[in-house]
Amino acid sequence: GLTSTMKQLKDGDVLNIVLFSSKASILVENYIQGDSSESDLNKKIASISATDSTNLEAGLKKAYELATKYYDQEKKNRVLMVTDAMANVGSTNPALIAKNIIINNEEGILLSGIGIGFDYDAAFLEELTDAGAGNQFLVATDKDAENIFSTGLLPLLMLAAKDMKVEIVYPSSISHISSAAEQTAATAEELKGVNFSYNAAQYYLERFKTDL
């Protein structure tokens, strides 16, 4: 997946890769597309293997340290976390992410997540990506991986709509029973807005009843 992603980079794009298990470590720092050695990058990517535990806190801290170090106001700055989100070491405070999404009153360093496997902790990863003003995406099959890590990745990291809310208006002759939405409220002010990336989709399931 990472190797496929490299093909989507443009000259001048900056890449940092952080690995995290029990602790976090930097695998790649300040790789510049079109300037740095691509063969060296591929060797480092090929060396990655799964080890030990899942310390999301350490991974996020190190990732944001690097993202802040190489922050460029003229570019899109993103942290992309690839994980099953089953944290079993350390703790993760969404405030750690939230303070980085706005820098100098401009869009800062947003967080998106790729959840690996059908049983990844979607609720936990969603809490993090909500704080990071990004989205999360599921990779459960080889086809998912092909789509996400190829031409589909970069558009998904770009915000298409911010703070979006959906209002449903229905006649008084029917009653709303239940919703499969993450959050519902009687007024827009009670809702937290959702950010949408390009090529993202959202489905809503609402149940109503009527005595007519």
Image: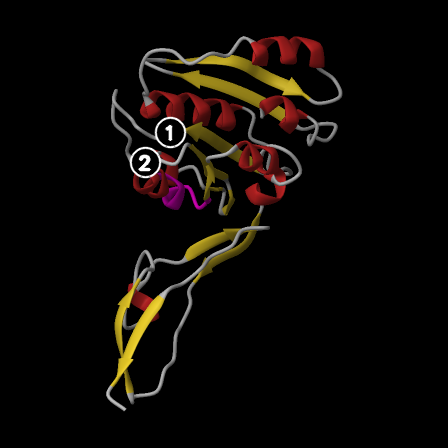
Residue 35 inside the magenta-drawn segment: no
What is the span of residues highlighted in magenta in the rendered image? Answer: 128-135
Q: Residues within 10 Å of mark 1 (few under 14, many from 20)?
A: many
| Amino acid of disc 1 | Asp
Q: Looking at the image, which residue is at 54% across and 51% down?
A: 200
| 54 left or right, relative to 106 | left
Q: Position of residue 162 (x, y in %)?
A: 49, 56
User: Is there a contact, CB below 8 Å, between mark 2 and mark 1?
Assistant: yes
| Amino acid of disc 2 | Asp
Q: Position of residue 156 (x, y in %)?
A: 57, 44
Q: Does the image show residue 149?
A: yes
Q: Identify the image quadrant of the N terminus.
A: top right
Q: Which residue is mark 2?
A: 121
Pick the front one: 58 or 5: 5
The vertical placement of 98 against 193, above or below, is above
Q: Residues within 10 Å of mark 2 (few under 14, many from 20)?
A: some
Pick the front one: 187 or 45: 45
Please tell me which of labels 2 and 1 falls first in the chain: 1
**Disc number for residue 210:** none
In space, the residues marked 2 and 1 are separated at their CA atoms by 6 Å
Q: Identify the image quadrant of the C terminus.
A: bottom left
Q: Does the image show residue 37?
A: no
Q: Looking at the image, which residue is at 50% across and 40% down?
A: 108
Q: Looking at the image, which residue is at 59% across and 50% down?
A: 199
Q: Which residue is mark 1?
A: 84
| 186 left or right, relative to 108 | left
Q: Looking at the image, which residue is at 40% across and 41% down?
A: 129
Q: Position of residue 21 (x, y in %)?
A: 36, 15
